[in-house]
Image (cartoon, grey):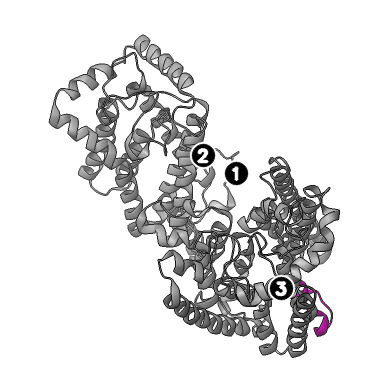
Amino acid sequence: MANVEHGPGKALVAGAATARLGMVRAGLWLIAAVLAARQVVAVLSTPSGERLTDLETWIGPEGVLHVTGSLYDADRFTGTPFGGLVLKPLARGAEQALGWAWTFGTLGLVVVLGLVVARALPRPVTRRTSLLAAPVAISLLMLSLPVRNTLHLGQTSIIPVLLVLLGCFAARGEKSSGLLIGIGAALQPTVLLFAPLLWFTGRRRAAVSSGVTFAACTLLAWAAMPHDSWTYWVHHVAGAGLGSSPDGLANQSLHGALLRFGLEGPLEIGLFLVLGSAVVVLGLRRAVRYAQDGQLLLAVALTGCVAVAVSPTTWQHQLLWVLLAVVGRVGRKASDRYVWPVAVVLVMTLPARMLLPGTALADPLRDNVVLIAAVAAATFVPFLSRTAPEYRAPVPTEYAKPVPARWSRVPLLPFWRRVLTRPNLLLEMLLIRVGYYAYQQVRLAATGGTNSGGRATAEAHGTQVHSLEKFLHIDIEHWVNHAVAQVPWLKSFFNFYYESFHFIVPLSVLAILYIRRPAQYRWARSALGFATVLALIGFWFYPLAPPRLMPTLGFIDTLHGVQDFSKPDYGTLTALTNQYAAMPSLHFGWSLWCGLVIAILAPKWWMKAIALLHPLFTISAIIATGNHWVLDAVGGATVVGLGFLLTYVFQGPRARTVMTAAATGQADEATHSNQTVLPTAKG
């Protein structure tokens, strides 16, 4: 009877879960389709002389595959002689369909690659994972820099990767597997590193077949084009030195990195051979170990990362192996599990300048960030074994008991539950850096990418704000600006305060909260993030000239001096920041956020009082230096207030309130239990 009663209810729950999963899956496939369409539009909308430039040099009307001489006379063709032999018959037929056919063909290969990757995930996987893996994999591939470069340049670098994956996960029989991998090696010689992986994992027939196929394809090309084969394999040592300068940032190999460090000649070659040999030994040993552990896709990715590092030239469109390393699991805690995949996705989808600041100290890391990721994955990132207990059941994150927000109709977002432990520091630093770069770019893009763009609109808005302040009798900016400019020490103090404390104080507050109050850190960080996003919307829709950039009002620019508005000079930030991003004022908004957070969390009354001095000094500085209107500060306070409001609405009360409420609830429950049990005991 119980089974009959509960059966329909369970069926309804299961049906609802299946429906939700279907909707999520459909949404992910829609995202993948939109990204694919966006790539097609981006390529085909580019002028014909700027798109598919590599393909044009190969099979265009004057392409190297049409000439009767050597493929390598002009250093425009960097593929193997076998690659030229395969492409040459297609050259004439491809001239008319150079853009459309190649672009859609490449997109088709990317889709197949994503489907193979999804199928190759280590077993066992949940039904949800198996259904959602394919569209997620295809979306990540579409967003990755290697695929975008391949589509833009008209390259063939996806084909060797796809041949290897088909050989490892789709081919039936070891000979077929080796055949596919051997053809891939004939197109890209470093793919031959997969032969040792096959050999040491027990697939020796496949290893032999791949070597034989590679040799046969290479000899066939040698017989057909002996001069070109000699040029490629002997004169250029497997293509080293062909194409662009090997010390360019696009060459993300150990050889390219050593050249960028200024090493050259026998010293550089010797060091490259030593480091390359170490990476090959360590990387292949780890790949074999993970393959034997049942993580063959991870093993393939690590072998590909080895190939990236030791190839003499590894251009940006050849770096797809690094993205495949995202399947490895790192971290025994659930809170650490997202660090590696997030780092890999950011490295493979965003320009290096977004990940690291543009300082000379960070140049070695920024210039070689993909190489560093490849070497790290191949040699020392501690991927978990499938036999480790934490592989499938990581140490869980500690959450506070959820308490609904005041507005019961607004659902709490499940992925923003109140976490009591501190987040992973590396992940936080990555997200903060990427978020700040996006903040800079949106500010600059709001006026067309230049400080002069949108000047007329910004000045018109400045006139509107000034008129409104005069109507409200709060137009004190001119008086304060001139009064401070007449007192040298006061002028210097406010200039220093404006330039220095804007970043130092918020970062210090976040650092202290991260170390001392991890649960409160998440609450404060979310409020700051919401406020900043809202401010960016204001910058975009209402560019506003600050008082110092209103040429007819007579304000003094205490920081930069008198300006020629046709060629302004704001120091090193002239071309990097939007001077018309004034409404709302994040200088005041961030300072108010700092003051409120400290005032709420500080244990002593005098700490709260001192904290509130920071927004007071900040509003004085932004007005005294002529950088903001009074109403800009009102706008800054508004977005901060909305930031705290949205945090409360979506996340509920902050963790301390939650913990107190939960403890009170438990105490009340215990009291009620004692009151009901004791009389029964007496009876």
Label 3, label 1: how far apart the Cα atoms are: 70 Å
Furthest toward the front, the residue is 69
Position of residue 143 relative to residue 279, above or below, is: above
Mark toward the start of the polypeptide (3 vs 2): 3
Image quadrant in which you'd find residue 75: bottom right
Q: Position of residue 611 (x, y in %)?
A: 26, 41
Answer whether residue 126 is visible to the viewer in this image.
Answer: no
Mark closer to the observer (3, 2): 3
Which residues fall within the magenta stretch? 165-177
- Magenta region, main secondary structure: helix
Query: Picture coordinates of residue 257 (x, y %)?
Result: 47, 67
Decide: is 360 above or below 228.
Answer: above
Is 51 left, or right, of 474 in this rendering? right
Q: CA distance from mark 3 to mark 2?
A: 79 Å
Magenta stretch holds residue 172: yes
Look at label 2 and name its amino acid. Arg
Residue at mark 3 = 227
431 falls in the magenta region: no
Q: Secondary structure at mark 1?
A: loop
**Which residue is identified by label 2?**
406
Q: Tag on residue 411?
A: 1
N-terminal of the pair, mark 3 or mark 1, is 3
Callout 1 amino acid: Pro
**Observer-nearest residue: 381 or 251?**
251
Q: Amino acid at mark 3?
A: His
